[in-house]
Image (cartoon, coloured by chain):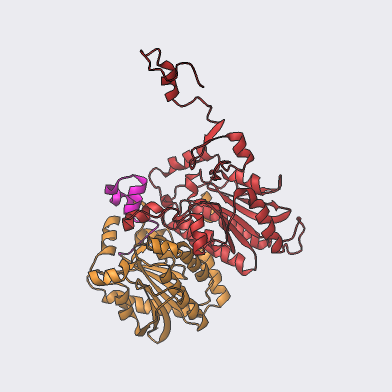
Amino acid sequence: MEAYKRVALARKKTRPTGQDFIDNLFTDFIELHGDRCFGDDPAMITGLGLLMDMPVTIIAQERGKNTKSRVKRNFGSSHPEGYRKALRQMKQAEKFNRPIVCLIDTSGAFCGIGAEERGQGHAIAQNLMEMMSLTVPIISVVIGEGGSGGALALGVADEVWMLENAIYSVISPEGCASILWKDASKTKEAANCLKLTAQDLLELQVIDKIISENHRDFKNVYRELTIGLYKSLQKNKAIDTAQLTQNRYQRFRKYGAIESVSD
Amino acid sequence: MLSKGLFKKPKNELEAQHRIKRKTDPAIPSELCRSCPSCKQLSFTSDLENNFHVCPKCGHHFRINARQRLNMIVDPDTFVEQHHDLSSSNRLEFPGYDEKLAQATLFSHENEGVIIGTGKIGDHEVALFVMEATFMMGSMGQVVGEKITLIFEYALAHRLPVIGYTVSGGARMQEGMLALMQMAKTSGAVKRHSDAGLLYLTVLTDPTTGGVTASFAMEGDIILAEPEALIAFAGPRVIEQTIRQRLPKGFQRAEFLLEKGFVDAIVPRSTQKETLNHLLTLHGISKGGDEDGSI
């Protein structure tokens, strides 16, 4: 399938959002709010729940389902307090030895005056740094749109998975077309060049697994994710913590490591 | 300059010739003078060089390249560059990227957008990285990310502090997700260095934006900035397009970040070496090459 068709599917308004995945993957979910510094970011849902019989910390980006909730959720674009809330929950997960599941779906971290004033760059940077050394297993799943740094801030994980029609990109195809070619009509071409589909990213080893998808019915997706997440988290829980963080470092260390650059 | 008949209205073209001439820019060789983008005053290049490339009239900091910075802060003849030869390849076969890389190499006389190595500042042994704006605006692709990771790993192995000068437009989109992954990779390297109790000090220079701001630029134990440097996650144009408002003057400048609590201090170029030296001393960084902690 052409890359831009995937972009359209990933952004489709009827596509299930973070909250749908929480409702279908976990039981006994309880949402926990706030970053303890500035406020609560509705674009980021965090809380605790059970994955089958395993307590987990859940971090999910939420873009909203109708106009009203989309406005409330800021269309899934987090402010710094969203990333700080996520980090607070992840640190707590580490304290109580709970695995972490991150569900990524954002067009990007929010670009605005408040976001810059409160240190968007700093908030994302802290997440990248801290996630690298968390001593509990982390699995991140790109369920819709994985937009640049705002997505990566939940993406430093032991395993990164993508849904078949999800995208994960350094920049939106629109942004790429207008910056590189000063021509917004070249969006489709940009989508192809950026290698943002799950298939491309599996080949580049940016992700570890694709969850196949029938985009009209997500029941199978939920079932596959529940079982897959459970198995992988159990597997990673068995690994010694020093080894776990070492593996995570090496997972990201390989991109552009000298051997692969020179060939 | 004043000549006879200056205020006389010319009767014909010949008479008016000296005035027509005056309309064109004075023929000053471009290497002799530079005009300040901030106060528009002309300064002799030699004066600028003696003044750390800072406008003597208004204090504007001209953009300078990485080698010039190294000369300003590192003790003479102590810098030893590492991995100079690393250069990028077009792994995603992104259209036009090969040409851009070739142009950037020609234009910047560097192989990539960052220089790494070791040197001494006030006789303190340090590891350094200095980003190069003339190489594709210091954007971070795999080689930039790799070099920064390598210098942190080297510094960890040899128990050295890292001093980093940042200037960047963000992640390099021609390398797609492999460029974005460098944010995670470099952050991991910073974290390991930090967990070992070692000092990391950044100096943010104009402009530091995007994926570099959202990774190693903002992860320093101490974050310094040059006066008036633009430091942002999203650039001002992107924000203006998103919120459809003009941004207030001075927004996202170093002084603004200081006020909001995101940088420790603003340090003009003339006192940067002194300040770095001072901070290294206060952290008890040993002097000379034969420190006990080295492995």
Q: Quadrant of residue B99?
A: top left
Give the tally of numbered discs: 0
Whether A250 is drawn above or below B137: the answer is below
Is residue A59 or residue A3 the one in the foreground? A59
Residue at image point 40% right, 57% down: A170
Tell me if B118 is positioned left or right of A23 in this view: right
Residue at image point 41% right, 17% down: B8
Residue at image point 53% right, 76% down: A135
Tell me if A19 is positioned left or right of B225 in this view: left
Residue A260 visible here? no
Quadrant in which the N terminus of chain A appears? bottom left
Whether B21 is drawn above or below A214: the answer is above
Q: Which chain is displayed in orange in the rendered image?
A: A
Q: Is residue A207 magenta?
A: no
Tell me if A16 is positioned left or right of B41 in this view: left
Residue A190 visible here? yes
Q: Quadrant of residue A47?
A: bottom left
Residue A237: x, y in percent? 49, 80
Residue B32: x, y in percent? 57, 30
Is residue A137 or residue A177 the one in the foreground? A177
Residue B28: x, y in percent? 52, 26
Whether B76 is drawn above or below B158: the answer is above
| Segment colored magenta | A165-191
In the rendering, what colour is chain B? red
Tell me if A249 is positioned left or right of A41 in this view: right
Is residue B108 or residue B267 the one in the foreground? B267
Residue A114: x, y in percent? 40, 64
